[in-house]
Structure formats: C-alpha cells, structure tokens
Image: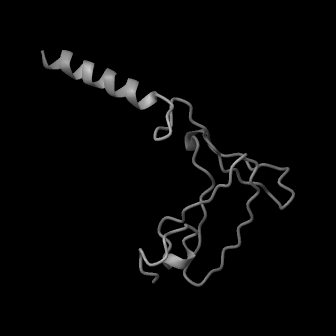
C-alpha cells in the first residue's frame, strides 16, 4: 500500500513540477559549460579529464596572490560564477538585492 501511495505522490508531484507556468521552470533545462583556453583568443581549448563532467576549470591561488580571469560569454543569457571558499562583502557579490532589506557588510 505504501509503495502505491508513494509512486502516485511522486508521479503527481513530477507532473505538477514539469508543467511550464510562470512559477515553474518546466521540463526543459539548459546546461552551460565553463571551458579553459590557453590564451585570450579563446581558440585553443585546454583538454580536461572526462571524469570532470560539466565541472569547469579549477582556479587555484594562495594568500596574497591576485587571480585575473577573463570570461567570454557565448550563452544567450547573462551568467556569472560563484567563488566557493573566497571571502567577499555583500556589495561585491554581484547580486541585486532590495536596498535596506539586507545590511551591507
């Protein structure tokens, strides 16, 4: 009985979730891949291990180093990156927010 109920709930949930409405993403998703190139011409792609899947290039740095990264966006929408493990202030996070709603660091 539980498995029937569970499969019904899951099926119903999936059906409701995949409908394309103003408050749902629908059933079509785009994936964007960050690639690494050998120079600023963006012509010579540096091969990566197939085990990386969709993971983009890893950026390595040490305390005191300055990393300068150039991006070329070939997607049809504006995109950004999120630097996990890097400290930054709210005013430098690159996200719009309601003024006065969150306190700026």
Which quadrant of the figure has residue 103?
bottom left
Does residue 65 appear to the left or right of 9 in the view shown?
Answer: right
Q: Residue at x 85, y 50 (%)?
A: 43
Depth order, front residue of 7/50? 7
Q: Residue at x 33, y 28 (%)?
A: 13
Does residue 77 appear to the left or right of 43 in the view shown?
Answer: left
- The quarter in which the C terminus is drawn is bottom left
Residue at the outermost front position:
22
- Looking at the image, can residue 88 be seen? no
User: Residue 36, image x and y in percent?
Assistant: 72, 54
User: Residue 11, image x and y in percent?
Assistant: 33, 21
Depth order, front residue of 83/47? 83
Q: Residue at x 64, y 55 (%)?
A: 79
User: Residue 87, image x and y in percent?
Assistant: 48, 76
Which quadrant of the figure has residue 14?
top left
Reply above or below: 63 against 96. below
């Amino acid at each position: 009985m539980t498995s029937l109920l569970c499969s019904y709930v899951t099926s119903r949930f999936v059906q409701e979730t995949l409908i394309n409405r103003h408050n749902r993403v629908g059933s079509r998703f785009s994936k964007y891949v960050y690639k690494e190139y050998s120079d600023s011409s963006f012509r010579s792609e540096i091969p990566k291990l197939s085990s990386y899947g969709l993971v983009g290039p890893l950026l390595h740095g040490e305390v005191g180093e300055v990393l300068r990264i150039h991006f070329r966006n070939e997607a049809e929408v504006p995109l950004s990156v999120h630097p996990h493990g890097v400290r930054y202030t709210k005013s430098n996070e690159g996200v719009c927010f309601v003024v006065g709603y969150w306190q700026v660091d």
